[in-house]
Structure formats: C-alpha cells, structure tokens
Image: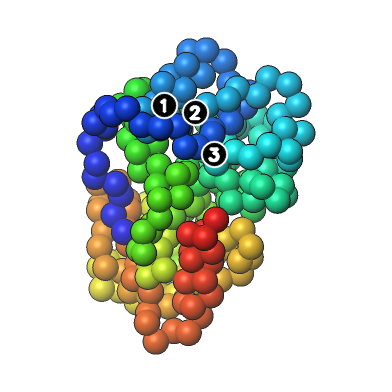
Amino acid sequence: MDGPSAAATPNLTNKKTSARVALVDLEDPTRSLLAECFRQFGMETKFLEMDAVGRLQKEKFEACVVRMGPLAQPVMESARTSPSNKRIVLYSIGGTVQEALKHSKYGINAVFQEPLERPAVLKLVRSTQMLVLHELRRYIRIPIITEVSLAVADGRRVKATSIEISSGGMSMRTGNETVAAGQSVELSFSLLTLPKAAVRGTVTWKNPTNHTFGVHFDKTDERRLRIKEWVEGCMEG
C-alpha cells in the first residue's frame, strides 16, 4: 500500500478523451495548468463558472476539482447526491489535509497542494487516473482522505489520515506518533456509504521519513468483508 512510484512525467500519447473533469472556483494560471495535466491523461476539463451546484446535479462528470472555500461544501454535496455523479472522484485544492478531513463525509480522494507545481500535479493525476477513467483492476487502491483511529496492541491510541485503501489493507500518514512494523492494530474509520468500519490488522511497512505506513487487514476478521464490498462498489462505479 505504499505511495505511487510512477514517474512525474507521463508518456505523451494521443488519447481519446474519455472522462470529463469539472473545475470549480479556480482562476488562471491554476485552471490552465490543471487542464493541461488532465488532458495528457485523456481527460477533458470543463470550467463551471455559473451554477456549478446545479450543473453537478444534472450533468455527468467523472471527477471534480474544487477550491477549499465557501463553495466547497455545496459543490461536494451536490456531486455526491447526484445519481450520475455519486461516485465522482473529488479533488480539493488550496486547503490542508485537516480542512479536507472536515469534509470527510463527502469522501475527498486527493488534495492538490499549493503552490501548484507541474511535476506534482502530473504525479497526482497519474496516481488517480485509473479511478477517474474506471479502468479498474482487481486489486485497485482507492485514494481516500478520512480520519483513522488505531488501537495499538501496546495500549496506545494513534490518530492517522488515510492515503489509499484496498480490499486487503490501507496506507496512512500520522503525525509525531509512531507504529512499528509487525504491530497488531485495530482500525476504526468511515467511508462515505460505510459510516462506521472497524477491522483488525498488522502494520506491514513504514516510512519514517514521511510518517507513512501500511496495514494489512486480518483475513480472519469477517468485518473486512464490508470494506471489501465497499471497494468493489467503487470498482463498479
């Protein structure tokens, strides 16, 4: 469940546009940079200047990038309650991970950090393109930002923020608190239509340089089946 290792710059090919990405509450040069980067992965961007909330209810989009400001909450709610866009991939821009967590019930998938840098934007788009284009594989990793509470076997409670989740495990990031590879943990978190989820697991890897680590779900814990169903539901979207 480690982070994506793909190169920042993709192989440029002539790809047929197969997905639409809504850009909301963005100005140039941000808008132009995002449009260019999504286009390199076969995605067309549409800037929603007027009635973004209404258009997200009526029009089909595969992804949406919204600035973390006053419009963020109504835009994300409109997308998630739309029959056509309930599985839309949501990106936020201009906010911190903590601000994204305040909107975690809408299932923000990834955050573009400002100031935008082209290599970082390309890397993030590349790591999420399969989800946007619905070119999903059996062991797809779903990028999702949600708060995770870990009960560690040594009695500690550790707070973390998820990075990706699959049917078999989850990668996440924590602050100054640490966990060790091999430790047993119990995870508690929420995922959009799965408001309460808990599962046992084992820390299988950690990267102390950026405070990230991965947990493999315990195959004997039947609660993981609910998570597996949720992930497979994203694949069907």
Going by the numbered disc 1, the residue's amino acid type is Arg
Residue for point 41% across, 26% down: 39
125 up-or-down from 170: above or below: above
Nearer-N-terminus badge (3/2): 2
- Identify which residue, 98 or 156, lies in the foreground: 98
Q: Say whether residue 21 is visible.
A: yes
Kindly check if marks 1 and 2 are in contact, taking CB atoms under 8 A apart as contact: yes
What residue is pinned by disc 2?
44
Q: Quadrant of the N terminus?
A: bottom left
Vertical position of residue 94 compared to residue 207: above or below: above
**CA distance separating discs 3 and 2:** 10 Å
Question: Three-letter amino acid code at disc 2?
Answer: Glu
Q: Position of residue 84 (x, y in %)?
A: 66, 47
In the rendered view, tell whether residue 35 sits above or below residue 108: above
Q: Residue at x 48, y 66 (%)?
A: 232
Residue 63 is labelled as 3
Crowd class of label 3 (few under 14; some 14 to 19; many from 20; radius 10 Å): many
Q: Residues within 10 Å of mark 1 (few under 14, many from 20)?
A: many
**Residue that lies at the very extreme toward the top in this rendered image:** 28
Question: Closer to us: mark 3 or mark 2?
Answer: 2
Q: Secondary structure at mark 2?
A: strand
Whether residue 49 sits left or right of residue 201 in the image: it is right
Rendering coords of residue 209 (x, y %): 25, 46
